[in-house]
Each structure stands twice: as C-alpha cells, then as structure tokens.
Amino acid sequence: MGTCLSVLQRASEARGAINDALRIASRRFEELSDEEVWALRYQLIVLVEALASMCMKFARAAWGRVFSSYRECLREVDRRLGIGCGEVLAALVGLRNLLVHRYFAVDDRRVYDAVKSDFKCVLEFIKRVEENAPCLSS
C-alpha cells in the first residue's frame, strides 16, 4: 500500500505545482516581481520532481522496472500507456535540468510562456498513471 499512497501523493504534488504555477502566471509577465519569477521556476522544478518520482514508483510497482533517468521513465511509461506525450514530458525534464543546473541561461519569459500554454499532457499522464497503478485500479 505504501507505493499506492506514494503515487497518489506525488500526483497531488504535481497538480499542486501546476495550480501554483498557473496562479503565478495569471498576471502579465511584466507585472511579476523577481520573487514571483523565481517562484514560477521553483514550481516547475517541484512539478518535474513529483512526476519523476511518481513515474519511478509506478514503473516499479506495475512492471518491476527500474529506470536510470527521469526522461527514460517518463517516455517509457508514456509509451506503454499509449498517452502520446513522451516528448513533452522529456522536454519538461530538460527544463528542470536547466533550472537546477544552469540557472544563468534561463529565459524567464520563455518559462512564463510555457506555463501559460497548457498542461494537458502532464495532467493526462498523471490521470493515466493513477488509473493504471496496480494497487489503485479497480
């Protein structure tokens, strides 16, 4: 049951990060304070960490599979579940890596614009993982 609870917790964290990012980005970019821009970056890091953790726990519980990278896990789970969002998810991992390791190279306007676009793929991924988790499916 621990894995089930963990998958649900990570899904909740991911949805919370999406909601917080959208709340911050609800204002025009030019109106955001430096702290809000940094908070937006942080929410994207939280989102990817939650997605990756959820993915790793799901893959292990569902298929006994352990992946060596976030990208590999997200792409493979996406492929196996037939979602069609693997490249979007992999790009989010790339953004997370940029935010964490090369913060000086980040174009905050592009981060803001990405948040404003939509999280359809991410939300579909979360939903499908929850529906297919061996301990959560009915």
Image (cartoon, grey):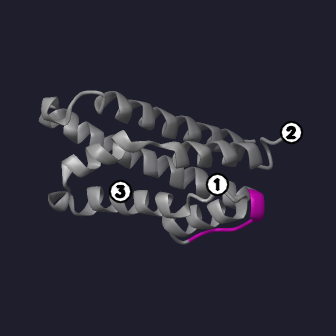
Residue 46: percent from the left, percent from the top?
A: 40, 44
Q: Nearer the viewer, mark 2 or mark 1?
A: 2
In terms of image quadrants, where is residue 74?
bottom right
Q: Amino acid at mark 3?
A: Arg
Instruction: Give x and y (percent) for residue 42.
Output: 31, 43
| Mark 3 residue element | helix
Give the residue pinned by disc 1.
57
Q: Amino acid at mark 2?
A: Ser
Query: Which residue is identified by label 3?
Result: 96
Which residues are drawn in magenta? 62-67
Q: Earlier in the sequence, mark 2 or mark 1?
A: 1
Measure how far apart labels 3 and 1 are at the Cα level.
Answer: 19 Å
* Image marks 3 and 1: residues in contact by CB distance under 8 Å: no
Please indicate whether residue 113 sits to the left or right of residue 18 in the image.
left
Give the label on residue 138, or none.
2
Residue depicted at 34% across the width and 48% down the height? 114
Do tag 3 and tag 2 residues touch (Cβ < 8 Å)?
A: no
